[in-house]
Image: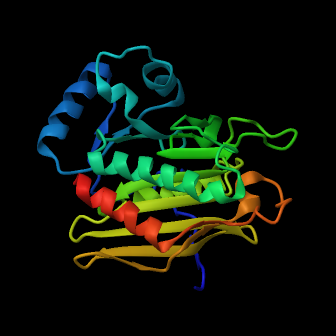
């Protein structure tokens, strides 16, 4: 397929171009935040919650370095953009979100087994990334080679997965820009997985840097027509971009999640909804 290019957003920070439909609340303190968060969780159908007017020191004190575990909200932030003074929260994940992340990770592990590399990557979970003006982010899943090249940070991901609902496309675009452009980190591949709400459809997109620009390099769509139907598969992951080295044996090659694995992923997600 011809790759599409993700243009840089027009806003100053990587969260500046989020959908205006996402509920927004100015940050006026922890007590007000918790009250607004609880009220919004009960009455809103939104998947996201956005705090505005929050600076670096406030974020660091009240969220990033807090030891307060009295409310789940403190652990649900996913992106902080100091340039736009925005802090984005993802409401408690649904079973389908968690199943999507967990099942994809298991299938990736299975796909590495034929090459003998099933235990050659580390699943980093969801750890904060970034710092300074570039902001912070947490992905739903992150992976890195267990034995990276000399000089490479063992805790720096080479591939990340972001899971969202249909209405989260603007958020996913901001994720891709952060990982592949804004953060200038070691991430080479961003996978986004969107769970359709209006119809049983799952869309997986693979984003990479191509000639120093961010491009969509693969799209896989899975529909439920009484049984899963996959278009655009199988999903292929570049070996060198994941492991930061070239293959050294005939068994080491690009990683492939075949059509049957993608069908299984979809079935697991739909059964959990």
In this view of the protein, can residue 86 be seen by the observer? Answer: no
* Residue nearest the viewer, comparing 175 with 245: 245
Q: Residue at x 19, y 31 (%)?
A: 38
Q: Is residue 150 left or right of residue 148?
A: right
Q: Residue at x 31, y 57 (%)?
A: 269
Residue 108 image point, x, y percent? 55, 55
Tell me: residue 141, above or below residue 217: above
Residue drawn at point x = 50 percent, y = 50 percent: 105
Looking at the image, which is closer to me, 109 or 91?
Answer: 109
Quadrant where the image shows the N terminus:
bottom right
Q: Quadrant of residue 152?
A: top right
Q: Where does residue 160 sit, x and y in percent of width and height? A: 57, 51
View extreme (bottom): residue: 2
- Whether residue 189 is visible here, answered yes or no, is yes
Residue at x 43% of width, y 21% of height: 62
> Is 55 situated above or below 142?
above
Rendering coords of residue 161 (x, y %): 51, 53
Would you place residue 82 above or below residue 4 in this image? above
Q: Position of residue 124 (x, y in %)?
A: 58, 38
Q: Quadrant location of the C terminus?
A: bottom left
- Relative side of 229 to 145, left or right: left
48 left or right, relative to 155: left
């Amino acid at each position: 397929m011809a790759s599409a290019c993700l243009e840089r957003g027009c806003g100053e920070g990587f969260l500046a171009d989020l959908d205006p439909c996402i509920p927004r609340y100015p940050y006026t303190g922890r007590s007000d935040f918790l009250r607004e968060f609880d009220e919004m969780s009960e009455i809103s159908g939104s998947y996201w919650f956005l705090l505005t007017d929050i600076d670096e020191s406030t974020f660091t004190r009240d969220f990033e370095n807090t030891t307060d575990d009295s409310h789940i909200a403190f652990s649900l932030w996913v992106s902080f953009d100091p340039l736009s003074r925005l802090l984005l929260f993802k409401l408690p994940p649904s079973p389908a979100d968690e199943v999507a992340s967990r099942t994809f990770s298991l299938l990736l592990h299975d796909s590495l087994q034929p090459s003998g590399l099933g235990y050659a990557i580390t699943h980093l979970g969801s750890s904060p990334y970034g710092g300074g003006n570039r902001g912070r982010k947490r992905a739903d899943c992150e992976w890195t080679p267990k034995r990276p090249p000399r000089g490479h940070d063992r805790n720096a991901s080479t591939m990340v997965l972001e899971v969202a609902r249909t209405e989260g496309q603007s958020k996913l675009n901001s994720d891709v820009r952060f990982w592949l452009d804004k953060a200038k980190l070691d991430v080479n591949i961003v996978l986004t997985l969107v769970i359709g709400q209006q119809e049983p459809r799952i869309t997986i997109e693979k984003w990479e840097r191509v000639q120093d620009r961010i491009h969509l390099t693969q799209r896989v769509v899975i529909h439920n027509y009484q049984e899963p139907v996959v278009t655009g598969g199988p999903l292929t992951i570049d070996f060198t971009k994941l492991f930061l080295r070239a293959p050294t044996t005939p068994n080491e090659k690009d990683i492939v999640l075949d059509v049957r694995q993608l069908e299984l992923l979809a079935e697991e997600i739909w059964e959990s909804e």
